[in-house]
């Protein structure tokens, strides 16, 4: 029991530190997968199939996390492009 008390915080700290060097795409995909797995397992347990619920929820969550990050990246690129166009137009008027 004592070893478990020491190991659990260590594993939690190491798993949080593992996200430090991830790209935003990877981080969003894995976050979505984790949340989807948890929600899927809970929903699946009501039907008696927690494993299937976790698997399906993880896959759907990973896809949703990836699509979310792609949308954020696309919006950021559009904002940057609009800023540069406005900046260039401002330079031409002076």
Image (cartoon, grey):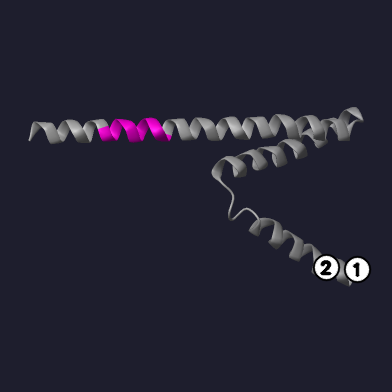
Q: Is residue 85 left or right of residue 68?
A: left
Q: Are marks 1 and 2 in contact (CB under 8 Å)?
A: yes
Point 69% across, 62% down: residue = 13
Find out whether residue 78 is within the magenta segment: yes
Q: Where is residue 38 shown, x and y percent of the image?
A: 76, 40
At x 12% / y 32%, what residue is drawn? 92
Q: Is residue 3 above or below residue 73?
A: below
Picture quadrant of residue 56: top right
Provide the secondary structure element on which disc 1 rests: loop
Q: Position of residue 69 (x, y in %)?
A: 54, 35
The quarter in which the C terminus is drawn is top left
Picture coordinates of residue 89 (x, y %)? 17, 30
Look at the numbered disc 2 and give the secondary structure of its residue. Answer: helix
Q: Is residue 5 above or below residue 77?
A: below
**Which secondary structure class fits the magenta region best?**
helix
Q: Residue furthest bottom?
A: 2
Does residue 67 appear to the left or right of 54 in the view shown?
left
| 61 sits left or right of 90 in the view | right
Residue range highlighted in magenta:
76-84
Q: Position of residue 43 (x, y in %)?
A: 81, 31
Q: Residue 1 — which label? A: 1
Residue at label 2? 5
Q: Is residue 91 magenta?
A: no
């Amino acid at each position: 029991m004592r070893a478990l008390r020491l190991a659990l915080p260590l594993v939690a700290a190491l798993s949080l530190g593992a996200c430090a060097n991830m790209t935003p795409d990877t981080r969003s995909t894995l976050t979505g997968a984790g949340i989807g797995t948890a929600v899927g397992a809970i929903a699946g347990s009501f039907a008696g199939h927690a494993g299937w619920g976790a698997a399906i929820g993880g896959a759907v969550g990973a896809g949703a996390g990836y699509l979310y990050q792609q949308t954020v990246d696309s919006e950021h690129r559009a904002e940057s492009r609009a800023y540069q166009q406005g900046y260039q137009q401002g330079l031409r008027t002076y």
